[in-house]
Amino acid sequence: MYEDNGSMVPTAVIKCLRLCGAILLLVGLVACSKNKAKPLVPLALETGVKPQAITLTEQGTQAFQGKEFEEAKNYFLQAVTAAPQSGPAHYNYALVLNALGQTEEARKHFIEAANLAPGDKVIWNSPPLAPYSNPESQIKKATPQQIPGRRGGPGGGSGGYP
């Protein structure tokens, strides 16, 4: 059977092409929606930190989620003070600094968080470290020791520089 518009293309072929077009459009929409960056959210602190730091982090998280960034900044700073060796505490403080546009200070705390929590994928995917954690990145990958501010290993202390 052929279309009534005088075309010599069979109706079945036209229907198949329309179906293929619809499928490609649907696949494209699904693929694009999966590429959206996940929102950055504060992390819970690891076990073993002071209960006060956990409480401050919970309060900071509530303020952060309510977009009360100045309040969240105060809570997260207190959490960092109470648990200075906590990667997630530095990460949370960096998140709120980043949200407030204080990107240089945020970068320092993102890097400190990575130093304190090596291998933590959430922390390593934070804005300033994402190029180093993305295997498809065109940027030359740095090892944790090459990142500015990174503490050297045993006997190190050189900050990662030769």
Image: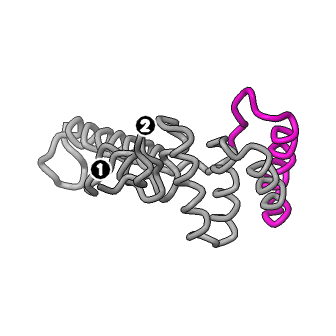
- Element at badge 2? loop
Task: Point out the stretch of residues depicted in magenta.
Answer: 43-71
Quarter occupied by residue 135: top left
Q: Residue at x 56, y 54 (%)?
A: 110
Instruction: Report x, y in % for residue 140.
Output: 25, 54
Rounded to the nearest angstrom, the CA distance separating label 2 from label 1 is 22 Å
Mark 2 or mark 1: name the one nearer the start of the chain: 1
| Residue drawn where x is 61% and y is 67% of the image | 105
Q: Say which element carries label 1.
A: loop
State yes or no: residue 51 in magenta.
yes
The residue shown at (83%, 60%) is 74
The residue that mark 1 highlights is: 141
From the top left corner, tell me how far across and down residue 64 is, in percent. 78, 55
10 lies left or right of 98: left
Q: Amino acid at mark 2?
A: Pro
- Give the quarter of the image for residue 20: top left
Q: Nearer the viewer, residue 69 or 152?
A: 152
Which mark, residue 154?
2
Residue 92 position within the rendered picture, expressed as x and y whole percent measured from the top left:
69, 50
The residue lying at 49 percent from left, 37 percent from top is 118
Label drawn at residue 65:
none
Front position in the image: 155 or 144: 155
Above or below 85: residue 5: below
